[in-house]
């Protein structure tokens, strides 16, 4: 998993409920997650890890954790140490052409 990149020359998009992302960073994350496209299954964090730490959605970096819903998703889609949150799974993993979903995102000004 990678940390977000700041590149002022790139396009940025807004993902509903998740925040603003540099477009190429988002696409790389989606492509990384799609390696497991056929292997994901819905899991509670607690089904995979018996602790109170957390994992991040491979695509949006949202937190999936064994905690109360007000601080994090407590489930997502899991395959071989890769997690994708419910929203990203529906938005980017399920569609045949994820670039259509990406293209439909709101374009925003590059953050200062
Ligand atoms: Zn996500």
Image (cartoon, rainbow, N blue to C red):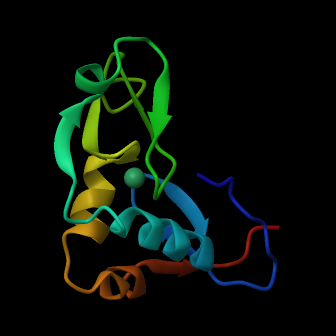
Task: Name the side, left or right, on which 107 lies relative to 48.
Answer: right
12 vs 57: above or below = below
Identify which residue, 107 or 4, lies in the foreground. Answer: 4
Residue at 83% over, 67% down: 112
Task: Name the side, left or right, on which 4 lies relative to 67.
Answer: right
In the rendered image, residue 87, in percent from the top left (x then y), is placed at 28, 54
Residue at 58% over, 51% down: 1
42 vs 28: above or below = above
Task: Name the side, left or right, on which 38 lies relative to 35.
Answer: left
Q: Which of the 4 quarters of the picture holds residue 88?
A: bottom left
Count of numbered marks: 0
In the rendered image, residue 98, in percent from the top left (x then y), is placed at 32, 81
Q: Among all residues in the image, which is located at the extreme front?
A: 80
In the rendered image, residue 54, in percent from the top left (x then y), is placed at 47, 26
Task: Name the side, left or right, on which 46 lies relative to 71.
Answer: left
Identify which residue, 67 or 108, lies in the foreground. Answer: 67
Residue at 75% over, 68% down: 111
49 vs 26: above or below = above
Q: Which of the 4 quarters of the picture holds residue 21?
A: bottom right
In the rendered image, residue 4, in percent from the top left (x then y), is placed at 68, 58
């Amino acid at each position: 998993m990678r940390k977000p990149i700041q590149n002022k020359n790139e396009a940025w998009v807004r993902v509903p409920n998740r925040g603003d992302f540099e477009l190429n960073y988002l696409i790389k994350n989606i492509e990384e997650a799609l390696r497991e496209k056929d292997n994901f299954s819905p899991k509670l964090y607690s089904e995979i890890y018996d602790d109170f730490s957390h994992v991040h959605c491979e695509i949006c970096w949202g937190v999936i954790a064994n905690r109360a819903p007000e601080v994090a998703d407590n489930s997502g889609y899991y395959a071989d140490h890769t997690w994708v949150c419910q929203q990203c799974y529906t938005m980017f993993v399920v569609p045949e052409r994820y670039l259509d979903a990406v293209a439909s995102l709101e374009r925003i000004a590059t953050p200062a």
